[in-house]
Amino acid sequence: MKRRRKYTPYALPPWLRKFRGVVAQFIIPFCIFQGIRTLLLPTVFDILFLMVLILLAIALHLEMI
């Protein structure tokens, strides 16, 4: 079996680290906006999109991505 290497964000190229930082800054306001929009006009797409945004925010916060 092949052993998995531990993920480190420092192994990423500089442009990808910068992009990850920008996405991490904007993901929470997008989640809040999408949550308000979902409360006002709920559709299946809005609910699924909000779940994806929340999962992405959690993954970025826990440094899984």
Image (spheres, rainbow, N blue to C red):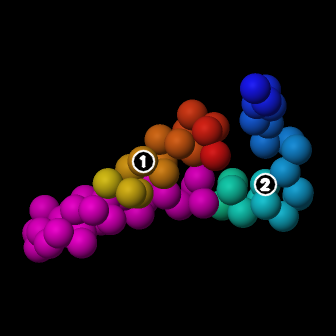
Judged by depth in the image, the label closer to the viewer, 2 or 1, is: 1
Relative to residue 48, is residue 59 depicted above or below? above
Where residue 31 appears, x then y in whole percent? 37, 58
The residue that appears at 53% across and 61% down in the rendered structure is 26
Magenta region, main secondary structure: helix
**Amino acid at dot 2:** Arg
The reply to whether residue 46 is in sight is yes
Look at the image and tell me in which quarter the N terminus lies: top right
The mark total stands at: 2
Q: Which mark is residue 55?
A: 1
- Foreground pick, 22 / 17: 17
Which residue extends farthest front? 1
Q: Secondary structure at mark 2?
A: helix
Where residue 58 appears, x then y in whole percent? 47, 41
Report the span colored magenta. Answer: 23-50
Q: Residues within 10 Å of mark 2 (few under 14, many from 20)?
A: some
Where residue 52 appears, x then y in whole percent? 38, 57
The answer to which quarter of the image holds residue 39 is bottom left
Q: CA distance from mark 2 to mark 1?
A: 19 Å
Q: Secondary structure at mark 1?
A: helix
State the residue position of label 2: 17
Q: Residues within 10 Å of mark 1 (few under 14, many from 20)?
A: few
Left or right of 27? Residue 32 is left
